[in-house]
Amino acid sequence: MILLLFGFILLFITILQAFIPVFLKPTLIFGINVPDQHAKDKEIILLKKRYTGVVLSVGLAIFAVYLVWAISQKPAEETLALVSVGIQFVVLFLSIAYYFIMHTRMKKLKEERRWYSDKNEVRVVDLKFHEKLQLLPKMAFIVPMVVTIGLIVYTIMKYPQMPELIPTHWGPTGEADAFSKKSYFTAISLPLILLVVQGMFLFTSEGIKLSGTSISPRNKKTSVKQQLAFRKYSSWLSFVMSVGITLMMGYFQLQTIHPEIASSIVMLVLPLGFLVLAFASVAIFTIKIGQGGSRIKVVEDEAEVNRHITSVDDDQFWKGGIFYINKDDPSIFVEKRFGVGWSINFARPLAWLFILGPILLILAISFLL
């Protein structure tokens, strides 16, 4: 079961990383902004295919070696879990390293071809864009937090009846493998961490409302509809993940308070169920929506536009095509250039708080256990 789980995760990561170029906006090539008139140039198509072929081949080769090793050596669960996570990071590292190689080649190609030399860069603004947003209301993310606060209160009320050792970590099979002596802090540590994670989902959803837009001047109607859909389903994805992790961690906490309800089957099925939910949601979102809603088909009759106009080239704000740094942009969240989802504006202090705050809080809670 453990091999099946980690093998599936490794295969999922390999396939997702290999086919990322397929799910991006046609004008974003390895983190480089390209005029839509040149998005389907032969050289660009070849670079995309080469990236997919190399990452997929290397990833599948590593996957095959991993399976042979796991089946032939039959390592202990702890060893298998440690090696599996390490290999997943190796695949991610190699795919990112090859991305930077392709990013450099794409940047050089853009400079050589001087695609923007004869183009008029235009920034299109839809003043009613944020009025058209159909994101889930803030309350959808607050309700799970209220449930967690109620769970904390309930834990404190039941504290005298709780066992002297509190589970603080669960292994890949769902069984507790680390314990701490009972105290009020250890008793509520798990829902406290859950509350931090829920807060991140809430902050992300609210940040999306204020994120800037990048509307194509050549396909304004289509671009607006795709971006509205991308934000809408991003909100839904955050909500599904928030509910999923709330159910899983909520059960972990309840079975700590009431050991009699503990079930090895449920403890195994819940984490697996959450992983299936997470991977399925991400896969559906990636395939159906794509980055910036690029895979959503919109039937619109665009007016004839000047072939010499194009979107503003803002490559200077994207370091390596991954890190966005623009102090003049008030947005905290921005659409990724490579990958499907959201990144942050590293020039905004609130964005750093979003990254470091939860990490420091969770580390502090874990350290005090």
Image (cartoon, helix red, strand yellow):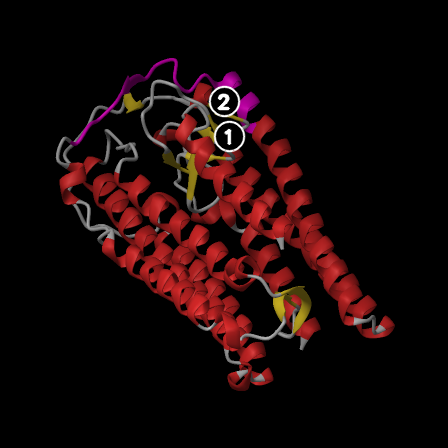
Q: Residues within 10 Å of mark 2 (few under 14, many from 20)?
A: some
In magenta, the rendered stretch is: 106-126
- Using the image, tell me which numbered label, if any, was put on residue 344: none
> Which residue is tagged 1?
321
Quarter holding the C terminus is bottom right
> Which residue is tagged 2?
110
Question: Which residue corresponds to the image point at 67% horizontal and 78% vertical from the top-left?
Answer: 1
Question: Which residue corresponds to the image point at 54% horizontal and 54% vertical from the top-left?
Answer: 16
Q: SS of the residue at dot 2?
A: helix
Magenta stretch encompasses residue 157: no
Occupied quadrant, residue 166 = bottom right
Residue 350 place in picture, x, y as percent: 40, 31
Q: Residue furthest top?
A: 117
Residue 135 place in picture, x, y as percent: 23, 51
Side of 159 where 166 appears, left or right: right
Q: Amino acid at mark 1?
A: Gly
Residue 10 place in picture, x, y as percent: 64, 60
State which tag comes first along the sequence, 1 or 2.
Answer: 2
The image shows residue 353, relative to residue 9, as above or below, that is above
Q: Residues within 10 Å of mark 1 (few under 14, many from 20)?
A: many
Occupied quadrant, residue 176 = bottom right
Side of 350 where 261 appears, left or right: right
Residue 136, visible in the rendered structure: no
- Pick whichever, 116 or 209, lies toward us: 209
Question: Which residue corresponds to the image point at 52% horizontal and 44% vertical from the top-left?
Answer: 361
The image shows residue 363, relative to residue 28, as above or below, that is below
Side of 222 where 171 appears, left or right: right
Work out how far the residue at label 1 is from the one at label 2, CA to CA, in angstroms. 14 Å
Question: Which residue corresponds to the image point at 54% horizontal and 24% vertical from the top-left?
Answer: 107
Residue 30 place in picture, x, y as percent: 52, 35
Q: Amino acid at mark 2?
A: Lys
Occupied quadrant, residue 3 = bottom right
